[in-house]
């Protein structure tokens, strides 16, 4: 097994579309790295360059210690699972899984053994003689996985492999993928635009936008300390609330004042914000870092809001509220009794306040 | 006032509604929709076919309404040595041209399925032999094959390959091959374009998956493209075989069946006997003799297509 190094890689389609811009990533051996980002951000392109299905305009891709820029896909020792599975429709499940081994001239017995082993792992033993069109979506997905794992490749590449499955099956397959990775330990690069998939599967997550890497890190690192406003808003559901604020010093303390709320950040954060005194910034707070205020909450962390919509999800309640001109979502305990049009006082968890530069959107 | 108006308008409208209702009866609608096709097929296919069978069983000549003679005509052509030559020529002609048309057409289709500059233009260009009226293009070929003024001979001579004129259409050993070349030239575009359409239904991801699986380009063709293209290939070949087997225009324009029946095919011989000599009934018998052979080909191929598709 091996790691993958992506160094300063660029991709220009037809010399015009700059799909991937200066992407650099070090993916360690046995690591499961997820590329996530909105549609068209260059995830697939990056993955396909690693696979060798797309030429690399500039930069280097290494698998293990080998520069693979000029190697055809078959010589890169990778396996890929496609979004639409790309199973050979005229071959049985067995032949689909065995194809890569046959092409690589494995002995018959070895092929039999490996396909059987993979089929056992994936629970598709009784499907081996069927054709792909006789399978359900979830079963096809397993076969596609099976075709990848029989080869024992250095690296697995996944391009949105679960996006064609229904919600329930997706959750189930997500868990299975995770188990599979723990069992096989093969280095994996996984592309998705689903942030939940990214957070649950990735050892590390790479957030991309417009061909640029926005941030790389462990899921909770990205969640708790997003590098910029885009990452902050992209990860987490319901999404982080943003309020445009003006920073001003009042009575020796720094205040963030927006339409409908005035917040006083903790001293440490205020220190970092000091250089922006008198300027603008974006305040961000996640719904779960808001709660109904009680008497002891300091004034600088509370604001008044009107409830507009109540979403009872069971484990929590989402309050869609309005403070000034801003819509702010708060996720509160299911025991909270609230009614639409109620005015209530919300308190912010001060440790979990985020500020972003108004100009370049970087976290402060 | 308003209600009165409404009832006045209602009666023709209601009649229209009733007419539409009748169309909702599926059997009536089906009959109505099938009628034009039925009439056309009956008029232009069934009637001539039945007449042909009747003719073949009589001794009709041009101007002489014949009597029923049973299978006499068939016995006669069975013992006719030219007929045997024509059968053999037709089978050989169909086989050779089909093999070449399929191979070249497939090759062209695979080439055209790639991305390159001016792809649309080249694709249109490839269709040219198919679009030009056969008789016109065949006359052009006739000129090219002309022993004296032939551009072919001139070219080969300039290149130093030959030192004497080749009589492409006049030499009995060469004539059939020359005709085959023209048939192939004319037939390849049909194969190429149809197979190209078939190729485009094959997801590129399958090729990518195969490439990652370690298949070399020709292996990808053999294990992925070819099996998936097979149903289309079979249908194209089926059409082409039927057309080639009954080919007439090419031979008629180029050689008229000669020299010494070297290029005589089913259709040309039937024409020669039936129209040329006026032996309508014998001509009809020859045309009909094509039928069982083609029928067998069609059945075999349809069975095979069915097997491939349900695989
Ligand atoms: N073959 C191509 N030719 C030209 N431009 C392309 C090509 N393939 C992709 N692009 C462009 O490159 C950019 C990145 O595409 P890519 O497929 O990598 O996005 P993605 O992140 O995988 O999106 P999605 O989540 O929708 O799959 C897009 O703007 C896309 O339009
Ligand atoms: Mg994609």
Image (cartoon, coloured by chain):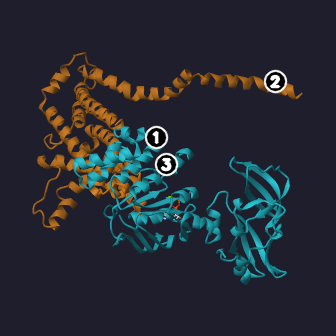
Chain colours: A cyan, B orange
To the question of a shared chain for discs 1 and 3, the answer is yes
Q: Residue at x 25, y 16 (%)?
A: B67
Residue farthest toward the front in the current orientation of the protein: A296
Residue A65 pos. (x, y %): 34, 72
- The disc at residue A114 is none
Residue plotted at (76% across, 54% down): A319
The image position of residue A122, as x and y in percent, is 40, 46
What residue did someone put label 3 on?
A173
- Residue at image mark 1: A136
Please report the residue visible at 37 percent of the width from the left and 53 percent of the height from the top.
A148
Measure the alpha-carbon separation of dots 2 and 3. 65 Å
Nearer-the-camera pick, B110 or A102: A102
Given residues A299 and A89, the one toward you in this image is: A299
Helix, strand or loop at label 3? It is: helix
**CB at mark 2 closer than 8 A to ligand 1?**
no
Drawn side of residue B193 relative to residue A241, left or right: left
The C terminus of chain A, quarter of image: bottom right
Q: Give how far apart the Cα atoms at labels 1 and 3 are.
A: 14 Å
Residue pointed to by mark 2? B7
Crowd class of label 1 (few under 14; some 14 to 19; many from 20; radius 10 Å): few
Q: Residues within 10 Å of mark 2 (few under 14, many from 20)?
A: few
Q: Secondary structure at mark 2?
A: helix
Host chain of mark 2: B
Q: Quadrant of residue A241?
A: bottom right
Are dots 1 and 3 in contact, CB under 8 Å?
Answer: no
Gap in Å between the C-alphas at discs 1 and 2? 58 Å
Q: Chain of mark 3?
A: A
**In the image: residue B233, left or right of residue A352:** left
Which mark is first along the chain, 3 or 1? 1
User: Which quarter of the image is occupied by the N terminus of chain A?
Assistant: bottom left
Residue A12 visible from this viewpoint:
yes
Q: Residues within 10 Å of mark 3 (few under 14, many from 20)?
A: some
């Amino acid at each position: 097994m091996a790691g993958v190094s992506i160094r300063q890689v660029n991709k220009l389609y037809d010399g015009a579309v700059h799909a991937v811009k200066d992407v650099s990533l070090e993916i360690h051996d046995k690591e499961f790295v997820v590329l996530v980002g909105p549609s068209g951000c260059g995830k697939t392109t990056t993955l396909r360059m690693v696979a060798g299905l797309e030429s690399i305009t500039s930069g280097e891709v290494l698998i293990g210690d080998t520069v693979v820029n000029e190697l055809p896909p078959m010589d890169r020792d990778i396996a890929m699972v496609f979004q639409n599975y790309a199973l050979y429709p005229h071959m049985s499940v067995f032949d689909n899984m065995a194809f890569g081994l046959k092409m690589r001239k494995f002995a018959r017995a070895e092929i039999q053994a490996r396909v059987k082993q993979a089929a056992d792992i994936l629970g598709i033993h009784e499907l081996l003689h069927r054709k792909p069109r006789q399978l359900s979506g979830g079963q096809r997905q397993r076969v596609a996985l099976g075709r990848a794992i029989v080869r024992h490749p250095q690296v697995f590449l996944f391009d949105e492999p679960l996006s064609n499955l229904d919600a329930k099956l997706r959750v189930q397959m997500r868990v299975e993928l995770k188990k599979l990775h723990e069992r096989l330990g093969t280095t994996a690069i996984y592309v998705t635009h689903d942030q939940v998939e990214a957070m649950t599967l990735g050892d590390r997550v790479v957030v991309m936008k417009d061909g640029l890497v926005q941030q790389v890190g462990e899921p909770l690192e990205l969640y708790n300390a997003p590098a910029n406003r885009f990452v902050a808003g992209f990860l987490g559901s319901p999404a982080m609330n943003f309020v445009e604020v003006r920073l001003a010093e009042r009575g020796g303390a720094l205040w963030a004042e927006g339409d409908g709320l005035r917040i006083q950040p903790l001293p440490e954060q205020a220190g970092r914000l000091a250089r922006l005194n008198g300027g603008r910034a974006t305040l961000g707070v996640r719904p779960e870092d808001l709660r109904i205020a009680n008497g002891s909450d300091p004034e600088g962390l509370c604001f008044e809001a009107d409830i507009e919509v109540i979403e009872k999800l069971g484990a929590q309640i989402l309050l869609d509220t309005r403070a000034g001109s801003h819509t702010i979502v708060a996720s509160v305990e299911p025991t909270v009794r609230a009614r639409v049009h109620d005015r209530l006082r919300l308190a912010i968890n001060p440790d979990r306040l985020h500020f972003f530069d108004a100009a370049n959107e970087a976290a402060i | 006032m308003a209600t009165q108006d409404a009832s006045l308008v209602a009666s023709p409208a209601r009649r229209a509604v009733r007419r539409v209702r009748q169309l909702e009866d599926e059997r009536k609608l089906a009959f109505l929709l099938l009628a034009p096709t039925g009439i056309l097929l009956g008029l232009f296919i069934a009637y001539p076919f039945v007449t042909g069978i009747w003719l073949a069983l009589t001794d009709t000549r041009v101007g002489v309404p014949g009597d029923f003679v049973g299978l006499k005509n068939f016995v006669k052509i069975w013992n006719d040595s030219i007929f045997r030559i024509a059968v053999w020529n037709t089978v050989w002609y169909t086989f050779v041209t089909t093999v070449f048309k399929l191979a070249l057409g497939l090759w062209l289709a695979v080439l055209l399925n790639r991305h390159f500059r001016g792809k649309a233009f080249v694709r249109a260009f490839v269709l040219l032999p198919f679009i030009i009226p056969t008789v016109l293009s065949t006359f052009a070929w006739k000129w090219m094959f002309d022993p004296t003024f032939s551009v072919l001979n001139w070219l080969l001579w300039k290149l130093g390959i030959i030192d004497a004129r080749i009589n492409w259409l006049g030499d009995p050993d060469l004539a059939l091959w020359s005709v085959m070349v023209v048939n192939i030239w004319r037939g390849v575009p049909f194969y190429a374009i149809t197979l190209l359409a078939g190729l485009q239904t094959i997801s590129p991801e399958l090729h990518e998956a195969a490439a990652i699986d370690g298949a070399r380009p020709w292996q990808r063709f053999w294990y992925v493209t070819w099996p998936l293209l097979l149903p289309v290939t079979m249908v194209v070949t089926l059409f082409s075989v039927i057309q080639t087997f009954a080919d007439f225009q090419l031979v008629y324009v180029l050689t008229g069946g000669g020299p010494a029946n070297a290029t005589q095919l089913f259709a040309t011989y039937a024409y020669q006997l039936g129209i040329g000599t006026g032996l309508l009934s014998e001509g009809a018998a020859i045309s009909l003799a094509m039928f069982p052979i083609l029928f067998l080909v069609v059945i075999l191929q349809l069975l095979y297509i069915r097997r491939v598709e349900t695989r």
